[in-house]
């Protein structure tokens, strides 16, 4: 499962409203090669499901990921921080053995 914190849920709703996206859009999360630790997180709105997508719903937010990314994201929580130490979405990923200083890439 992939879950979402209350703060991230609120930010996703705000971004969706600001972009004028309809309710058929969902949050697609993924992992791509790159970054200083080897793997980077990817986050975007989408409205088209793909074969082998893994679909989760938490706190009323539909989260979708491809099967390959799910292997890296299993039991991950998407959070949002608006503090002084960095503003933006970040992933609390128990599968990551290390992450870079910016928090945007990781290794397993």
Image (tube, helix red, strand yellow):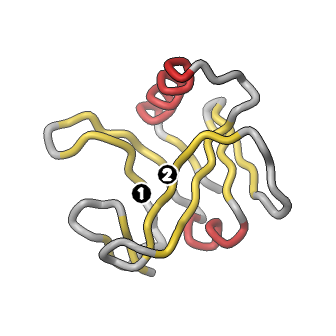
Mark 2 to mark 1: distance in Å? 5 Å
- Looking at the picture, how far across and down is residue 53, in whole percent? 77, 58
- Name, please, the residue furthest toward the left: 84
The local secondary structure at tag 1 comes to strand
Q: Which residue is mark 1?
A: 92
Q: Is residue 55 left or right of residue 35?
A: right
- Looking at the picture, how far across and down is residue 102, in whole percent? 24, 60
The local secondary structure at tag 2 comes to strand
- Looking at the picture, how far across and down is residue 69, in whole percent? 62, 68
Q: Residue at x 38, y 51 (%)?
A: 90
37 relative to 103, above or below = below
Disc 2 or 1, which lies upstream in sequence?
A: 2
Q: Are marks 2 and 1 in contact (CB under 8 Å)?
A: yes
Few, some or many residues within 10 Å of mark 2 (<14, 14–19, 20+): some
Q: Residue at x 33, y 41 (%)?
A: 88
Q: Which residue is mark 2?
A: 77
58 relative to 23, above or below = below
Q: Give the quadrant of the N terminus.
A: bottom right
């Amino acid at each position: 499962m992939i879950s979402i914190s209350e703060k991230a849920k609120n930010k996703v709703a705000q971004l969706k409203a600001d972009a004028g996206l309809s309710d058929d859009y969902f949050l697609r999360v993924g992992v791509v090669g790159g970054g200083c630790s080897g793997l980077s997180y990817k986050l975007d709105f989408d409205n088209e499901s793909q074969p082998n997508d893994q679909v989760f719903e938490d706190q009323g937010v539909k989260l979708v990921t491809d099967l390959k990314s799910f292997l890296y994201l299993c039991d991950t929580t998407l959070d949002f921080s608006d503090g002084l130490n960095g503003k933006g979405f970040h992933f609390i990923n128990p599968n990551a053995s290390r992450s870079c200083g910016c928090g945007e890439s990781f290794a397993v």
